Each structure stands twice: as structure tokens, then as C-alpha cells.
Image (spheres, helix red, strand yellow):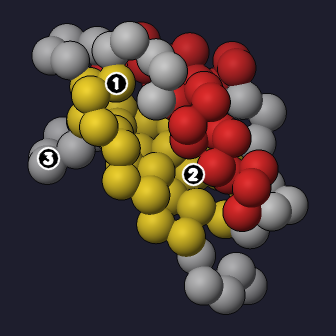
Amino acid sequence: MKAYILLNTKPGTSLQVVERIRVKTKEVIVADAIFGRFDAVVVVEAPTLEAINKIVYGIIEKDPTVIRTETSIVLDPM
């Protein structure tokens, strides 16, 4: 399964957050700090929805500088 995880972080911390996520999570395909409504986007690939759940709630949302996440699951990965 593939998911796009959009993050809001505390001001000035998005670059550090994506670097920590890259290091902690082998399922990360892309992790970029961005400009716009969200501060960062993370793309993960994991075998199950439960595995994605563990990444979002067990790793990303536990980061003290992450304020909020929004996850979009890909319906039909090619």
C-alpha cells in the first residue's frame, strides 16, 4: 500500500522533521519540506494499512514538532 502523509509542523522545523522521518522509517519513499498549506509531505509504501497506521501514529505523530497530519491512501498503486 502507498500513502501520502501531509504534515503541519512548528514554525521553522519542517526540514528537521523530514530528515528525522527519513532516518527512522525505511518505508519512506519521499520526504520533502514544502511551501503551501502543509509544511511537509511524506510518501510511504508498506505492505498493510496497519503498517501505515504504525508509521503515522507510532513515528510521525510522536515527533514533538509535528502539529497535525493528514493521510491519503492510494486506491490503486500502479
In terms of sequence position, does the residue under pointer 3 or pointer 1 come before the other? 3
Q: Position of residue 37 (x, y in %)?
A: 14, 49
**Who comes first in sequence, dot 1 or dot 2?**
2
Q: CA distance from mark 3 to mark 1?
A: 16 Å
- Element at label 1: strand
Residue 58 x, y percent position in the rendering: 62, 30
Q: Is residue 40 left or right of residue 43?
A: left
Residue, x 85% and y 61% (percent of image)? 47
Callout 2 amino acid: Val
Mark 2 is surrounded, within 10 Å at the Cα level, by few (under 14), some (14 to 19) or many (20 or more) other residues, namely: some
The amino acid at mark 3 is: Gly
Circle 2 residue: 43
Determine which residue is flagged by label 3.
Answer: 36
Q: Which residue is mark 1?
A: 66
> Which kind of residue does numbered mark 1 sit on?
Val
Of badges 1 and 2, nearer the viewer stands 1
Element on which disc 3 rests: loop
Residue 77 visible at all: yes
Q: Are marks 3 and 1 in contact (CB under 8 Å)?
A: no
